[in-house]
């Protein structure tokens, strides 16, 4: 099987399962969602988070490299491999966060309240989580990935599913980039950085209060101008910060 098809398959799986992971994290642990609502994670509309898709491809390549070089034959080699996974995932997270901040003036996550954070985009705690996730992948997933790839090679009709995924993903990405451009315009005009998850949580609550049907997908679609909701979300965030100071 070609390397391209293998990585495309892994990107599909990683994006999907990463979305599920983020969905539960946003529901139960995220400070950006104080109401603990079910909120579609990430900046895309569909059920996928591209960061995790890229991450799974990196984990696969590092695990394959560890097997080819013999690193995995010793405890020290495994520790080095997991460290490489944590560093790689942290680097991907930081690069994605910086690009969104600098280009779109949007912050998708915020670790500024955690110890040792860098620009609120990465921190030691989540680097540890990445290392743990890499270990889980190595022991519980990677041995079966090869079998799954062999199954895919023998069932090429499934490649249609991957092609369909990338077709929908491309359209979704175009829509999301257009939406980010609107958020950047607001951020430039007001000299702020838009906290994306806070905005989605605010819109979810606002729709409930207006007795409108919740929008899990297309969560930023509103009848009122989006700029009005942005200002309200920023005001609500400031009020929560003021209450914590009291």
Image (tube, rainbow, N blue to C red):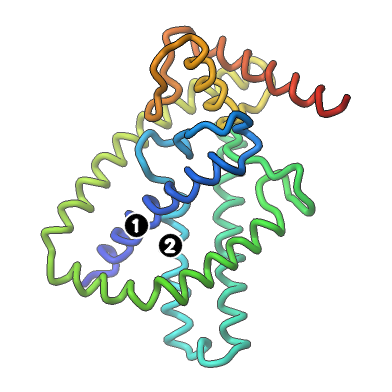
Is label 2 in a helix, a strand or a loop?
helix
Quadrant of the image occupied by residue 44: top left
Is residue 105 something one can see in this rendering? no
Left or right: 64 as drawn, with respect to 3 = right
Residue 13, label in figure = 1
Assign the N terminus to one quadrant of the image.
bottom left
Which quarter of the rendered picture does the C terminus lie within?
top right
Q: Nearer the viewer, residue 228 or 33?
A: 33
Judge whether 212 appears above or below 126 on screen. above
Give the residue drawn at x 30%, y 40%.
170
Distance of label 2 from label 1 (alpha carbons): 8 Å
Quadrant of the rendered image containing residue 214: top left
Between residue 137 and residue 88, name the one nearer to us. 137
Q: Which residue is mark 2?
A: 56
Residue 6 in the image: x percent, y percent? 29, 66
Q: Are marks 2 and 1 in contact (CB under 8 Å)?
A: yes
Which residue ends up furthest to the right in the rendered image?
A: 246
**In the image, what residue occupies the spot 36% across and 29% down?**
175
Look at 52% across and 12% down and name the residue there: 209
Which tag, 2 or 1, sits closer to the chain's start?
Answer: 1
């Amino acid at each position: 099987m070609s390397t391209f098809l293998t990585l495309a398959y892994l990107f599909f799986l990683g994006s999907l399962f990463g979305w599920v992971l983020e969905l539960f994290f946003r529901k139960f642990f995220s400070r950006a969602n104080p109401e603990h609502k079910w909120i579609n994670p990430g900046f895309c509309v569909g059920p996928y988070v591209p960061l995790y898709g890229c991450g799974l491809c990196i984990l696969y390549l590092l695990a394959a490299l560890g097997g080819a070089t013999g690193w995995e034959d010793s405890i020290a080699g495994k520790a080095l491999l997991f460290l490489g996974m944590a560093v790689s995932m942290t680097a991907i997270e930081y690069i994605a966060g910086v690009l969104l901040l600098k280009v779109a003036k949007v912050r998708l996550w915020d670790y500024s309240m955690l110890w040792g954070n860098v620009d609120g985009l990465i921190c030691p705690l989540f680097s540890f989580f990445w290392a743990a996730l890499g270990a889980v992948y190595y022991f519980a997933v990677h041995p079966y990935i090869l079998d799954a790839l062999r199954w895919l090679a023998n069932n090429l009709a499934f490649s249609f599913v991957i092609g369909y995924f990338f077709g929908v993903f491309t359209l979704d990405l175009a829509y999301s980039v257009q939406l980010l451009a609107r958020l950047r315009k607001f951020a430039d005009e007001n000299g702020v950085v838009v906290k994306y998850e806070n905005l989605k949580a605010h819109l979810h609550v606002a729709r409930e209060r207006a007795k409108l049907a919740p929008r899990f997908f297309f969560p930023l679609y509103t009848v009122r101008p989006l700029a009005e909701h942005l200002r309200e979300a920023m005001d609500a965030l400031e009020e929560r910060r003021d209450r914590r100071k009291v």
